[in-house]
Image (cartoon, coloured by chain):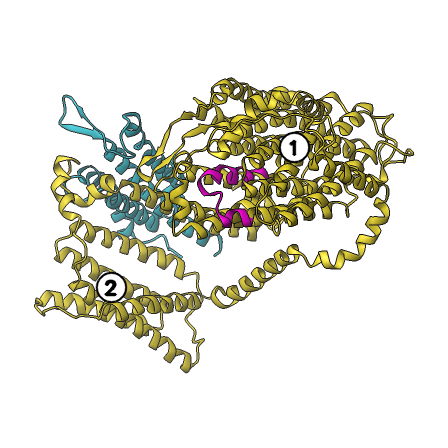
Amino acid sequence: MMQLAVLSGFVLAAFAPLLHRWFGAGTSFVLAAFPAALALGFLSLMPAVMDGEVVTYAVEWVPSLGMSLTFVIDGLSLLFALLITVIGTFVLIYAGGYLKGHPDLVRFHIVLVAFMVSMLGLVLADGLITLFVFWELTSITSYLLIGFNHADLEARKSARQGLFVTVGGGLALMAGLVMLGTAGGSWSLAELGTMGDVLREHDLYAPLLICLLLGAFTKSAQFPFHFWLPNAMAAPTPVSAYLHSATMVKAGIYLMARLQPSLGGTEMWIGILSVVGAFTMFTGAFLAIRHTNIKKLLAYSTIMALGTLTMLLGIGTEGALIAFVTFLLAHSLYKGALFMVAGILDHETGTKDVTAMGGLRSLMPVTALVAMLAALSLAGIPPLFGFIAKELMFESVLEAGAFRWLILLLAFSAAFLTIGVAAIVALRPFFGERRATPRVAHEAPVSMLLGPAVLAVLSLLLGLVPVLASMGLLTAAASAVMGEPVTVSLSLWHGVNLPLILSLVSLALGYVLFRQWDRVRARLARLDPLIARGPESGYDAFMHWITVVSDWQTRILQNGYMRNYLMVMVLTLIALIGNSLLLRHSPEIAFHLDVRFHEVVVVSLMVMGALFAAITRSRLSAVVSVGIMGFSIALTFILFSAPDLGITQLLVETLTVILLVLVLFRLPRFATLSTPLERVRDFLVAGCVGVLITLLVLTAWGIDQFVPISGYMIENSVTLAHGRNIVNVILVDYRALDTLGEIFVLALAAIGVIAMLKLRATEKSKPASKEKESTDG
Amino acid sequence: MVKSGTLILHTAARILMPLQLLFSVFLLLRGHDEPGGGFIAGLVAAGAFTLYLFAFGVSATREVLRMVDPRDLIGIGLLLGMISVFPAWFMDQPFLTAQWWEIPGIDFKASTPLIFDVGVYLAVLGSVLAMVMTLMEVDKDEP
C-alpha cells in the first residue's frame, strides 16, 4: 500500500528519539534506509509508468466531502518522487556527518523525515485538498528546519520570513484550489487534467489562475517573492541541499507543471509565466554575483534556475516542456551536489566566504573533483547533463511566441552570469594560492562525500549517455506535463546552430566575468541602495505595519478591562443583528397575549432580580439576584414541560452561584469609577441591546424558514436510538460529536482555572523556583 | 472564607452526600428513557461533593475521595468518551454510530451511548469539582 509506506515516515519521525538511543551515531544510516527503500519501490514502478500507464492507489479519506488520499503516479510525480527519495537518502547520510555530535541532531532528524514525507505526499496526491494539506506541512516543517539554530536571531528571522511568504501564498493557493475545484466540478487532479478546454473557458479562469500562481510563485521564490530563499540559507547546509535545491522550492514548479494540461496555453498563462520566469531568472543570476558567501551564491543561482523552469512552462511548446523536465533533473543533481560541497567547505574550513578560501585542491582532492563536475554541469559545459539542458532551453526560447527577444536577452545574460557563478564556486576555493582559513582543512569524511559524489557522477553519466534519462523517466514526465504522449530524444551534439553559438559566447563572457569578478563586485556595490529598496523592504514594511496595527487594536479593543470587552462585544452585536434585523426583515411582532397568573409571577421575579442586580451595591446580593433570574428561567422550562432543561438549568445555576461566591470573595468592594456621562452611555447601550434582543425574539416567533428536524428525532428516538428521552438521545447519540467537543471544552476550562490559580499561587510563595514549579505542575 | 460550619450543616452534609451520589447514579442510568443523563447526573454529583466541601473543607473532602483526584476524573471521562467512538470504527460504520449489545440474563442493554454518557458524567463531575476545590484551596493559602 503506497499511502501506508509513505505516511509511515511520520511514525518513523516520531520514533527518531528511540532510534537515537539504540543506534547512536549510526541513526542517520538507519533513517536513510527509509527513503532508500521508497526509492526502490518507485523504481519498480518505472516500467509501468514508462509504458504510459498512470498508477493509481485509491484511498478514501472523507468521502462525504469529496476528499481522498488517493495517490497517482505518472511520469511527473515519479520524477519528483525519485528526486525526493534519492536525494533525501544522501542528505540524511550527509547530515549525519555534517551535524555529527550536534546536541539537537534528533530534532533535525524528526523534522527532516517529516518534511520528506510531506513533500512526497505533495507530489503524489491526487486530491486538491490533500495536496494543500501536504503543501502546508512542507511550509511548517521547512520553517522548523530553517530556524533549526533557533538560538540565532538571524535564523529565527529568516525562518519567520520564509513562513510568512510561503504561507501567505498558501492562503491564495487555497482560494485558487477551491475555485479550481468549483470550476472543474472535480477535486481530483487527474480528472481536472483532462478538462482543460472547460477550465480555460470558465469565468473563474483569471481569478483562479492568479491565486494558484501566487501560491506557486511564493513557494518557488519567483520575483518579487524571491528574497526569502537567500535568507533561508541560515539553515544548516543539509537543509539547503535538500529543501532549497531539489524539493521544497520546486513544489511551486511541480504545481504549475501539474496544472499545465488543465490551465496552460492561454495568453494569460504564457504572458505571466514566461515574463515572470525570465525576469526571475535574470534577477537571480544578477544578484548572485554580488555575493561572496558561497551559500548565497548558490541560493541566487537556484532562483535563476527556478525562474528558468517557470519560463519554460510559460513558453509551453513541446520543446520547452522537454527542456523543462531535462533542466529540472539536471538542476536537482548539480545543485544538490554543489550545496553539499558548500557544506563540506564550510565544515572543514570554518568560513563560507569564497574569497577567504584558496588552494584547497591539494588538501581536498575528492571534494575539488566533485565541485568541478557539478559546476561544469551548472555552467552548462559538455559533456555534462547541464549542457543538454541549457541547449534545449535556448532552443525553446528561440521558438517562443510572445516576448521572444526580451526573453532571449534575459536568458542569455542569465546564462553568462551563471557561468561566472559556477566558476567562482568551483575554482575560487580550490585553485590559486593557499589561504589561511579559520579551521585547518581536511578531506571530508566518506559520509559527507558520498552524496555529492553520486549526484555529480550522475550528472556526468547522464550527459555522456543521455538516452538513460530520456528513454524512460523524462519521456514519461514530459508527456505528463504536456498532457499527451511526447517523445524525448536527447543528445549532446546538436550540430552548429544558434543555441551552440549562444553557449559559446556566454562561456567566453562568463570567463571574463570570473576574471574580473572582484572589480565587478566593487562596481555593483554602487547599486546597493537601489537593491535595498527591493521587494524585501516591502516585506519589512508590511511586518512593521502589522505590529503597529496589532498594537493599536490591542490598546483599543483588548485593554484588559472587562467593561471594555463587554462594550465592544455588545456594540458589535447591536451593529450586526440590528443591521440584519431592521434592514432585511422588517420586525413583525406577532403574538397574542394569553398569559396565566403563575407565568406573570415568574416573569416579575425575573424582572425584579434583574433590577436588583443592577442597582445593588453589594457583590453578594448581585450574585444572588442574578441567581434568582436563573432559577426563574429553570421554572419557566419546567412550566413549559422541558424537565431536562429545567433540571440542568437549576443545577448549573446552583453551581454558578457557588463558584461566583468563591470568586467574589477575592475581589475588592464595589467602587464608582465612571463619570455620570459614562453611566448614561452605558445605560443607553444596555437599553439598546435589550430592546434589540426583544425585537429579535418577537420577530423570530413569526419566522418559519426551515422544516424543524425535531420530527425526525422524535420518530426515530425509540426505534433507532433505543431511548425515550429525546434530550438525552440527542446528547449522546444524534449529536454525540458535539457533546464530545463540549466535554473537552469543559475539561480545558477546568485545566485553565487550575493553571491560573495554582501557578500564580506557587509564584507568590516560591519566587525562586518559579520555573521549575511551572514545568512540573 | 468558608467557616467549617455548624452542627446542622455537618449532619446534613454527612447524610445527604451519599444520597445525592446515589441519586446521581440513578439519574445517569435512567437518563436514556426518563429525564436525566450524564450531564445532569454529573452536576448532581458535583453538588454533593460541594456540599461536603462547604461543611468540612478541602482536606476532609480529599480524604473522602481517597486516591481519586478530580483532575484524573476529567481524564478518565474524556477517555471513556473517546473509547465509545471505536466500536463503530471497527464495525466499519460512520463515526460515532451507536452500538447496542444485549446482555443475556438481566434486562439490560449495554451500549456505546451508555459508555459515552458515563464519560460525560465523569468529565463534568471532575471539571466542576476541580474548579471548586482549586478555588477553595487558593483561598486557604491566603488567609
Q: Give the x, y percent position of residue A259.
A: 47, 40
Residue behind mark 2: A629
Where residue A729 sits in the image (x, y, percent)? 20, 41
Spatial CA span between label 2 and label 1: 80 Å
Name the residue located 29 percent from the left edge and 43 percent from the top edge.
A739
Q: Is residue A251 magenta?
A: yes
Supply the letter of whichever chain is cyan. B
Quadrant containing the N terminus of chain A is: top left
**Left or right placement of residue B27 versus residue A268 in this view:** left
Q: Position of residue A37 (x, y in %)?
A: 55, 19
Q: Secondary structure at mark 1?
A: helix
* B17, above or below A101, in the image: below
For disc 2, the chain is A
- Crowd tier of the residue under label 2, counting other residues whose Cα lies within 10 Å: few below 14, some 14–19, many 20 or above: many
Question: Against A535, is A476 above or below?
Answer: above
Front residue of this view, candidates A474 and A587: A474
What kind of residue is marked 2?
Met
**Magenta segment, which residues?**
A249-272
The residue that mark 1 highlights is A389
Look at 24% across and 34% down and name the residue there. Answer: B114
Note whether A25 is above or below A738 in the view shown. above
Question: In the displayed structure, does residue A547 sit left or right of residue A639?
Answer: right
Dominant secondary-structure state across the stretch colored magenta = helix
Q: Colour of chain A?
A: yellow
Q: Amino acid at mark 1?
A: Ala
Please indicate, yes or no, whether residue A227 appears anywhere in the rendered image: no
